[in-house]
Image (cartoon, helix red, strand yellow):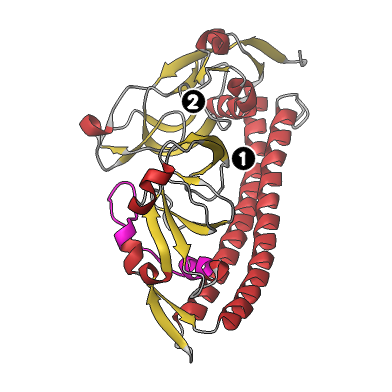
Amino acid sequence: MISGWITDEIDNLCNVEYGTRVVQKNDGGTIYPVYGGGDATFFMDTYNREDRLTIARFAMSAKCTRFVKGKFFLNDSGLTLSPKNKSQIEQDFLNYQCLALNDVFYSLAKGSAQKNLDVPAFRKLKLNIPTDRNLQRKIVVKLDSIFAEIDKAAAAAEANARNAEALFQSFLTEVFEGNREGWKRHSIGNICEELFAGGDVPKDRMSKERGNKFAVPIFTNGEKDKGLYGYTDKARVNKPSITISARGTIGYSQVRNEPFYPAIRLIVATPKTDIIELDFLKYAIKSISFIHSGSSIPQLTVPMVKDYSVALPNSRTEQIRITGKLNSLNEQIEKLKYSDRTKANELSFLKNSILKKAFSGELVKA
């Protein structure tokens, strides 16, 4: 125990305040965001919290604490803490201590499919509180100042990463949308020997593929390849192809050189190799700003992709030359993005280190 600090269980020091169960269909609105165990999910026209730190209760992830500014609605997937004795504990100090305990809270998650907080064990966790409220305030002021600088630096690093990506996208647009001599526009449907949604089986392969089960990669959409493996009887893609995310984060494309079974959230484009190089098609697709359907969850369909057109030189040699330049530039951009996002992650770790010092009595002395 730190001199001048008390140590006691959450249950003795705090009110554990659960959120309220709501569903978008019955309760949805347009004004206040709804939070629970993670980020905001929809909006409502009423609120039950303001400027509070939330703790995930159901569907926990590694980031199970977050401070939400302004008015919001907390559903039953989350909870908040408030001091039982407001003359003993500052709310802002309690908020920071909860942030410091994020990993401890997550260690209490139970369940395999969905991790839920072990609330009885959570209530027995112990907090360290200075008896001097002025010291609590000093710690909060110090943390506010330090975190403001860290957040500023992290935002700048993330902005640099986004700017690098935007620069590459701008270059792609210039390459594929400019009026270049000897280039001709082709619809994606005409330069692909196959274009279909993941999970569908093209009719000409129906009898051959059904019942042919192997442990092979199953790819989903999003910016990171999950690389899942499983057994399936869905259409196997044997030729090098491009996959395009068709739901949520639409338009993200990747080259698939090995046989795979695409998930239903993907559109598969297998190029006619006598017309277009695989990597050149990847960049051509990346240059497109896809218009999607769907109001709440963006969706891309095969007919939509089929009708988009891209410009390409007739010369395969020219395609290979341009692809080489794009690969080189893309590699440089990815290095810049990696460097900036590594810096942002390091700043996040620095926050955790400072929080540990704050609640071990090292940051501000009495």
The answer to which of 345 and 331 lies nearer the viewer is: 331
**Magenta stretch contains residue 137:** no
**Magenta stretch contains residue 297:** yes
What residue range appears in magenta?
281-303
Relative to 128, is 15 on the left or the right? left
Quarter of image, res 215: top right
The answer to which of 280 and 362 lies nearer the viewer is: 280
Amino acid beneath label 1: Asp
Q: In the rendered view, tell whether residue 37 sits above or below residue 168.
A: above
Disc number for residue 56: 2
Whether residue 264 is visible, yes or no, is no
* Image point (63%, 51%), residue name: 154
Quarter of image, res 335: bottom right
Provide the major secondary structure of the magenta segment.
Answer: loop
Relative to 136, is 260 on the left or the right? left
Name the secondary structure under disc 2: strand
